[in-house]
Image (spheres, grey):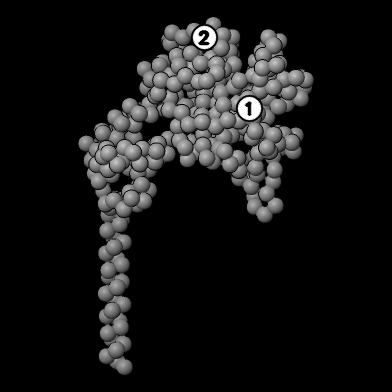
Amino acid sequence: MTGKTNKDAQTSLSNADTLNRRMESNMSMFRAEMGEGEFKRFAELIHKEFGIKMPPTKKVLLQSRFQKRLRALGLQSYEEYCEYVFSEKGRAEERRHLIDVVTTNTTHFFREPKHWDIMNNIVLPEVWRRGIGNGQPLKMWSAGCSSGEEPYTLCMILSEFANRNKGFDYTVLATDISTEILQKAKRAIYSMEKADEIPMEMKKKYLLKSKNKPLIKIDASLRNKVRFQQLNFMENFKLQEMQDIIFCRNVVIYFDRDTQVVLFNKFCNNLKQGGYLFIGHSESLSGMRLPLKQVAPTVFQRL
């Protein structure tokens, strides 16, 4: 009995040592730093394909975000992951995951409240006076829509305006580069705390509560007004229809100045004369030669 017990104990210790070595190996894999060469290649790729600037100060952030992909692919180093991303197979299969890893999706309902006041008091009454939304739906674009809070907020604002103005109609195009985040936006399911910023009357009209979980879902009357589409701003895109209003907020802050100028020109090429462009309060068009005039802070009209 004693010999067997000792043997079992030795086996257990051996197994424990093996497990510890594996754990140490896994931990060391993620303690390893990304080489300067790999970071430079990633940074150039991310800027070229997605427009996002990636200065050296972002290296640690990029390392952290790549760890998930290394684990998923069973790779042992950032060097291996770099070689995979730039391989033929990686170009075909990994780029969509790379987009999800490097993009930031911070958003919430009724973000930047002053914009909703401008919509209600200036923009919508003005376009309605011009006959937009009567007969032909007003066309609005949420560019960089993330997980859907912005386009659904737009739908609430527009639906309330339609309730006050008989005959008014609208559609919303919502685009993002990330197919993963677009799937979340299409599901239109959010945690209960996400609804804190939504006015109570709108909560009653446009939100469905889960019976068993602290979740809400956007009502079908709004979901049916939104068309989601994957779009990379770095492409030479042309929308099927010219837009009456474009919201692109807190997106271009991740781009360098030259990329911003090119992108805003693309927006102007997809915006009707007299149409409106909303940008984020931390963003600026100062010094850019664009066919726009400012009508309010961070709100511009197409000339």
User: Which residue is most to the top?
Assistant: 303
Residue 274 point in image, percent of width and height: 59, 9
Earlier residue among tags 1 and 2: 1
* Percent x, y of residue 32: 26, 48
- Residue labelled with disc 2: 292
Q: Position of residue 194 (x, y in %)?
A: 61, 40
Q: Is residue 249 visible?
A: no
Disc 1 on helix, strand or loop? Answer: helix
The amino acid at mark 2 is Leu
Indicate the quadrant where residue 47 lies: top left
* Pointer 1 with pointer 2, Cβ within 8 A: no
Tell me which amino acid carries mark 1: Leu
Q: Nearer the viewer, residue 90 or 50?
A: 90
Residue under label 1, please give it: 154
Label 1 to label 2: alpha-carbon separation: 22 Å
Given residues 298 and 275, the one toward you in this image is 275
Look at the picture and state if 241 lies above or below 205.
above
What's the residue at 31%, 53% (across, down)?
74
At label 2, counting other C-alpha atoms closer than 10 Å, the crowd grade (few under 14, some 14-19, many 20 or more) is: many
Q: 27 or 227, which is in the foreground?
A: 227
Question: Looking at the image, which residue is at 30% across and 82% down?
Answer: 9
Which residue is drawn at the image coordinates 29% and 51% (left, top)?
75
Residue 103 can be seen in this image: yes
